[in-house]
Image: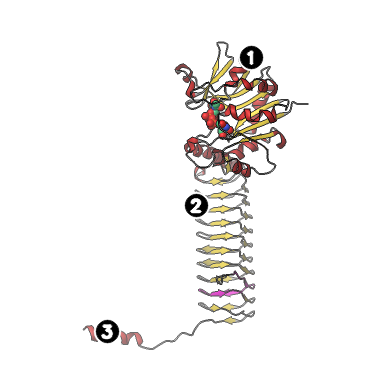
């Protein structure tokens, strides 16, 4: 049997360089909290009961942000460095045999394959531990990997504590470690805060173990972009971009056309079918699924919604928690606020707002309408400027419109109200009573024409001024 793995994720720090009131690991990149990314990757290595998060700053919020299946929590009440954070876990974890993998909560890019590579590097060597390193063009801020003349890793020196010749080293410690648990826990008590910051540096464990006769190996990866840490908001934006790029690439390789891919924002759980086109600056968020052969217009935002095949979303359209069936169209400039159901082939046109509304198959509301708490059957035509008055000041009420009804322009439907199948509402009607099927409802005063009124007025005006 393979040796069991325990994973510890350090997430207790404030993240001073973020200049934020929120814990660093609760900032988001690529559509998830930073710590969530790390946790997901950790789960590919160990079962939840073997994953521990060291929390401290805003511990409750960090705990709350962790979804199921969760992880164990260890409190680091004072933040005295990464080594100190692991020391806080010693009591709970030192008894667990096998391997100890330590990750930082501010390093969300790491892929399962990379982590597996680190563990394999430890397992296949006779070393007591493996640290993940990369050669960086500019390793400023990172710990530097020290090696002896024979190339053996002898230690890691932090930026702040490094001598000039050490600062010239371009091989950086990326902050992912796999140690044999037994020697690691035996020697952790040797950590000392003997550096300018007076912190317990986890990185000192490399030298401590090396000196105690437990060699440490380096697992060097080619591309440091895969394990960049986040310390400030510039790096947060850069990592967000990298995570978004990964998602967009994955979708493009699966047959989705994405125009100007660097401009779109697509959350990790979004699924999109083949031959769908996503136009520039679209945002597809949360648990959104989109079928095949759809078009998502430029600058549209779709959140937690389900779009079937052949759906067309025009530019500048905002859709939340709604379902659009095949061939439905929305926008440009439409807002499907929440819990709408647009059936097959229905159209929602420009400046139309829908809230908790069902639009039956083939129904159309093409211009300037508000439909809230409404149930429209199939084949209904809603004219420009029609609105449902769904709110009476204290409660919401339903409007029901039967199949094939025609809602004249600028109709005002005062809910609760029902319009029967095939009925007509005259333009400009204020409808307060139910309309029977196939009837015409005229809810407005009749037009009066006053012959010659305008001409007379003009002539009168001339007399006065001329
Ligand atoms: C650390 C490494 C550095 C490495 C870099 C890679 C140390 C001393 N240095 O530096 O060699 O190149 O990561 O990104 O480890 N944390 C706690 N408790 C604390 C302090 C920090 O839980 O008391 C957590 C933080 O929440 C964070 C992680 O540890 O998620 C790393 O801490 P950070 O201060 O960002 O370390 P770096 O300075 O980036
Ligand atoms: Ca960091």
Q: Is residue 460 above or below residue 308?
A: below
Lower sequence index among marks 3 and 2: 2
Lower sequence index among marks 1 and 3: 1
Secondary structure under the numbered disc 3 in the rendered image: helix
- Which circle, 2 or 1, is nearer the viewer? 1
Q: CA distance from mark 2 to mark 1?
A: 59 Å
Q: CA distance from mark 1 to mark 3?
A: 108 Å
Relative horizontal placement of residue 465, taking residue 152 as reference (left or right): left
Quadrant assignment for the C terminus: bottom left
Question: Can you identify the residue that label 1 sits on?
Answer: 212
Q: Which residues are magenta?
A: 395-417
Q: Mark 3: few, some, or many residues within 10 Å (few <14, many ≥20)?
A: few
Viewer-closest of 97 and 124: 97
Q: Residue furthest bottom?
A: 451
Secondary structure under the numbered disc 1 in the rendered image: loop
Q: Which mark is residue 299?
A: 2
Quadrant assignment for the N terminus: top right
Viewer-closest of 351 and 25: 25
Give the residue displayed 56% in from the left and 18% down from the top.
155
Report if the beta carbon of the residue with label 2 is closer than 8 angstroms to ligand 2.
no
Q: Which mark is residue 461?
A: 3
Q: Is residue 398 above or below residue 153?
A: below
x, y (%) of residue 334?
A: 52, 60
């Amino acid at each position: 049997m393979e040796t069991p793995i325990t994973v510890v994720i350090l997430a207790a720090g404030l993240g001073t360089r973020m200049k934020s009131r929120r814990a660093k690991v609760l900032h988001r990149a690529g559509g998830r909290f930073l710590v969530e990314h790390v946790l997901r990757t950790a789960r590919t290595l160990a079962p939840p009961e073997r994953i521990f998060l060291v929390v401290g700053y805003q511990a409750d919020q960090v705990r709350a942000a962790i979804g199921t299946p969760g992880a164990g929590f260890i409190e680091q009440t004072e933040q005295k460095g990464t080594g100190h954070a692991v020391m806080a876990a010693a009591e709970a974890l030192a008894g667990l045999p096998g391997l100890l993998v330590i990750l930082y909560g501010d390093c969300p890019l790491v892929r399962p394959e990379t982590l597996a590579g680190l563990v394999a590097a430890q397992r296949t060597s006779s070393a007591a531990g493996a640290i993940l390193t990369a050669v960086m063009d500019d390793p400023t801020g990172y710990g530097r990997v020290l090696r002896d003349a024979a190339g053996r890793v002898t230690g890691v020196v932090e930026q702040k504590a490094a001598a000039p010749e050490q600062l010239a080293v371009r091989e950086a410690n990326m902050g992912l470690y796999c140690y044999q648990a037994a020697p690691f826990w035996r020697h952790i008590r040797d950590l000392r805060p003997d550096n300018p910051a007076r912190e317990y540096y986890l990185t000192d464990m490399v030298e401590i173990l090396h000196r105690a006769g437990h060699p440490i190996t380096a697992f060097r990866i080619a591309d440091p972009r895969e394990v960049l840490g986040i310390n400030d908001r510039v790096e947060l934006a850069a990592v967000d971009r990298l995570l978004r790029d990964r998602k967009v690439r994955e979708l493009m390789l699966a047959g989705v056309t994405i125009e100007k891919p660097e401009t779109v924002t697509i959350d990790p759980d979004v699924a999109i079918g083949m031959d769908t086109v996503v136009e520039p600056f679209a945002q597809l968020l949360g648990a959104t699924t989109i079928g095949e052969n759809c078009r998502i217009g430029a600058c549209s935002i779709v959140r937690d919604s389900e779009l079937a095949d052949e759906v067309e979303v025009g530019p500048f359209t905002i859709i939340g928690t709604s379902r659009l069936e095949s061939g439905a169209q929305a926008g440009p400039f439409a807002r499907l606020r929440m819990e709408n159901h647009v059936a097959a082939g229905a159209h929602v046109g420009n400046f139309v707002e829908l809230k908790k509304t069902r639009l039956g198959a083939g129904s159309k509301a093409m211009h300037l309408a508000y439909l809230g708490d409404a149930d429209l059957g199939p084949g209904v035509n809603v004219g420009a400027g029609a609105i449902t008055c769904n709110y009476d000041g204290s409660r919401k009420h339903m409007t029901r419109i039967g199949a094939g009804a025609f809602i004249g322009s600028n109709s005002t439907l005062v809910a609760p109200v029902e319009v029967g199948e095939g009925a007509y509402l005259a333009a400009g009607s204020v409808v307060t009573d139910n309309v029977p099927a196939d009837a015409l409802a005229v809810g407005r005063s009749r037009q009066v024409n006053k012959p010659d009124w305008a001409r007379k007025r003009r002539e009168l005006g001339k007399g006065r001024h001329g």
